[in-house]
Image (tube, rainbow, N blue to C red):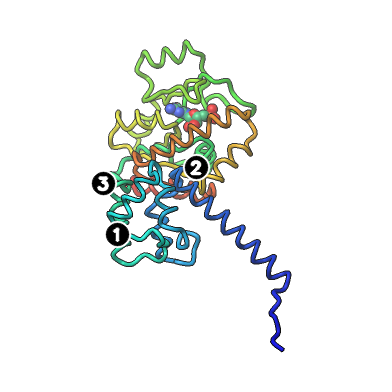
Amino acid sequence: MAETRVIPEVDRAAAARKAVERRRARASLKRDLTMRVITPQAVLRRAIDDPDSVEGSMRITDFLLALPAIGAGKRDRVLEDLQISPVKRLGGLGARQRVVLEHWLDGRFPPLSPRGARSRLLVLAGPTAVGKGTVAAHIRENHPEIHLSVSATTRPPRPGEIDGVHYYFVDDAEFDRLIEHGELLEYAVVHNRSRYGTPRPPIDAALAEGKTVLLEIDLQGARQVRAAEPAATLIFLLPPSWDELVQRLVGRGTEGAEERARRLRTAKVELAAQNEFDHLIVNENVADAAAEVVELSSSSAR
Ligand code: 5GP
C-alpha cells in the first residue's frame, strides 16, 4: 500500500513563517521604492546579482507600480515599449531586457552626478529624523580637524544644550539683525516653528585657515547654500529603509501623533529632493555614516 507523505508540523510552521517574512520584506521594499529610500537602479542591480533575493523575486509589474508617479496605465505602456512580458520577475529578465530597463530608469530617475571640483564646504542634509544631528555630533567629538558650523536659532534650548556649542540661542530681534547685516549664509523656518541660520563669519574664517567646514542644516538651507556657493559639496543622508525612518520618528517620542504624521509627510517630500545632491550616504549606523562624511571631506582637502 502506498504511503501518504505527511509534512511534519514544525516544517509547516517554519514554511509559513518564512512566507510571512518574505511578504513583509516585499512590502517593505515597495515602500522603500515609493518613498525613494532606495533607487530603482539599486534594486535592479541586486535582483540581477541574486535572482533568489527579495529583489530578484519581485514581479516587474509590482516593481514599476512601486516607483514614484507610475500608475497602472503608464506601467503597461512602459512594458509594451520595452517589450517585457508582465509575468517576468526582476531576477528573470533577459540580458536585452535588463539593458533597456536600466536605460529607461536612468532617463526617468537620473543617477547623481557629483560635481567634479571638490570643495571644502560640506553640507549635510536629509529627511527629518534620519539622524543628521547625531552624525554631526559624532563628527564634532571625533574629528576636531573639521569645523562644524554652529547655527543661530530662535528656538529655546533643550535640557543639556549649551549656548555657543550646540546653537547660538537668539531672540527674534537678534535674528532679524543677523539677516539685515548679511551675517547669515542661509536661513529658514524649520518645522513651521523656529528660525535657524548659518552664521557666515566663522565659516569664512575656517575656510581661510584651510579647514573643511561642515554644515548640518535642513533642505531649504542646503538649496540656499548651493545657490550662494555653487561649488559646495551637498551630502544627503538616507535612512536604511522607510520603515526604519518611521520607527526613528516614533521612537524619539518627542512629538505627538499629529506632528509625527506631518513630519512623515515632510520626510516624503524631502526624500524626493535627493537628486539635487552630490552624494548619498545611508545612515545604517552613526559611526559608519560619520566616517563616510569624513572620507568625503578628506578627499576634498587634497
Ligand atoms: P533641532 O531643533 O531638532 O535641533 O533642529 C531642527 C532642524 O533644523 C534640523 O533638521 C536641522 O538640520 C535644522 N537646522 C539646524 N541648524 C540649521 C541652520 O542653520 N539652517 C537651516 N536651514 N536649518 C538648520
The kind of residue on which mark 3 rests is Gly
Label 2 Cα crowd, 10 Å radius (few <14 / some 14-19 / many 20+): many
Q: Earlier in the sequence, mark 3 or mark 2?
A: 3
The location of residue 203, given as percent across then percent down, is: 38, 30
Q: Between tags 3 and 1, which lies in front?
A: 1
Disc 2 target residue: 139
Q: Earlier in the sequence, mark 3 or mark 1?
A: 1
The kind of residue on which mark 2 rests is Ile
Q: Between tags 2 and 1, which lies in front?
A: 1
- 60, 2: nearer the viewer: 2
Disc 3 target residue: 116
Could you tell me which residue is drawn at 44 percent across and 53 percent down? 62
The CA span between labels 3 and 2 is 25 Å
The CA span between labels 2 and 1 is 49 Å
Q: Is residue 144 visible?
A: yes
Give the quadrant of the N terminus. Answer: bottom right
The location of residue 11, given as percent across then percent down, is: 68, 70
Whether ligand 1 has any atom under 8 Å from the Cβ at mark 3 is answered as: no
Pointers 2 and 1 in contact (C-beta within 8 Å): no
Disc 1 target residue: 83
The location of residue 259, given as percent across then percent down, is: 58, 27
Hey, which quadrant is residue 89 in on the image?
A: bottom left
Q: Is residue 166 visible?
A: no
- 13, 218: nearer the viewer: 13
The location of residue 4, given as percent across then percent down, is: 70, 80
70 lies left or right of 133:
left
Hey, which quadrant is residue 211 in on the image?
A: top left
Could you tell me which residue is drawn at 35 percent across and 40 percent down? 277
Q: Classify 187 as above or below 50.
A: above
Q: Classify 43 as above or below 255.
A: below
State how many labels appear: 3
